[in-house]
Amino acid sequence: MLKVRFLGTGTPIGAGGLLQSCIALETANTRVLLDCGMTSMVALHRGDMDPEGIDAVIISHLHGDHFGGLPLLLLDASMRRRTRPLLVAGPPSTAPRLRQALADFGWTGTWEHCQNFLNFGTLRPREPADVADLRVTAYPVPHYPGTEPTAIRLEHGDKVIAYSGDAGWSSTLLEAAESADLFICAVWSFDEDDPSFLDYRTFRRHQHEFRAKRILLTHLGPPMLDRLSDVQVDNVEVATDGLWIDLL
């Protein structure tokens, strides 16, 4: 069984009052975060989830609303004198960017305090990697190149979850979502043409090509939130903060 809890489904600017990107994945043995936006610590506490119970964090790309909660997670861990191992898996620059973020925030000693439990794994394009008890594969997608953007495919037993991360349209999304039980797709706008962000009109044009059993839209910007009444596609739902899904 794989449990999915949407802790944050919003944007960097807080559109709709939604928290930034953060999805909790739970198996019988582990708890993993998929992205960790700057509001993730708030989301964890609202959901009565102990940050110390997180075994790993998977980062899709290095924009602050997707990895900016990591410095706060480490600050909390340092204050608690955490010893339980924590794995952070993401793009190649994740570790140095995280260390720099801690320095920029003024928590320079936190990095050193975390070295006894903190480990890093690099997710390289199309190279499956084990993260906790999940099999994780990253796929390069079009977004801001400096953030090293990827879509993420996660497998646990016979269950598959795919996540677009932030991405413009690319057939790579079809590859990542192939036969997924759940495809979580970020759709920023309704019909704005932007190579770095998927819009709903483009998603709708390609929707029939996705071979996922269930599709949830997330990361909806103001232009999309203003047009929710126009979102009417079979097998497509809109994720909200606090939503639970159990893949049995």
Image (cartoon, rainbow, N blue to C red):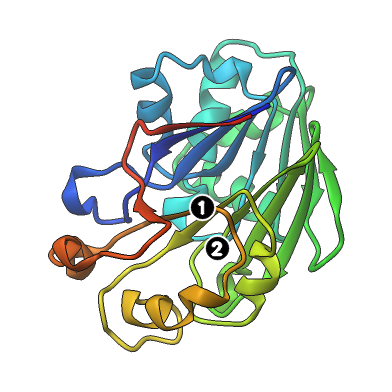
Q: Residues within 10 Å of mark 2 (few under 14, many from 20)?
A: many
Specify the quadrant that holds the C terminus.
Answer: top right
Observer-nearest of 155 and 132: 155
Give the CA separation, mark 2 to mark 1.
14 Å
Nearest to viewer (mark 2 / mark 1): 1
Observer-nearest of 87 and 176: 176
Residue name at image x 15 percent, y 61 percent? 229
Which picture quadrant has residue 199? bottom left
Residue 164 badge = 2
Q: Secondary structure at mark 1?
A: loop
Residue type pointed to by label 1: Arg
Residue name at image x 43 percent, y 24 percent? 44
Name the spot of residue 154 as percent of width and height, x first: 71, 48
Q: Secondary structure at mark 2?
A: loop
Which picture quadrant has residue 108? top right
Observer-nearest of 237 and 83: 237
Could you tell whether 121 is left or right of 69 in the image? right
Name the spot of residue 193 as percent of width and height, x first: 33, 89
Of the image marks 2 and 1, the number of the one nearer the N terminus: 2
Decide: is 114 above or below 202.
above
Specify the quadrant that holds the N terminus.
Answer: top right
Observer-nearest of 67 and 243: 243
Decide: is 24 above or below 116.
below
Residue 158 badge = none
Residue name at image x 86 percent, y 62 percent? 127
Name the spot of residue 91 as percent of width and height, x first: 70, 60
**Residue that mark 1 sits on:** 214
Name the spot of residue 212 as percent of width and height, x first: 59, 59
Looking at this rendering, what residue extends furthest in the front direction? 234
Residue type pointed to by label 2: Ser
Residue name at image x 43 percent, y 37 percent? 6
Could you tell whether 135 is left or right of 47 in the image? right
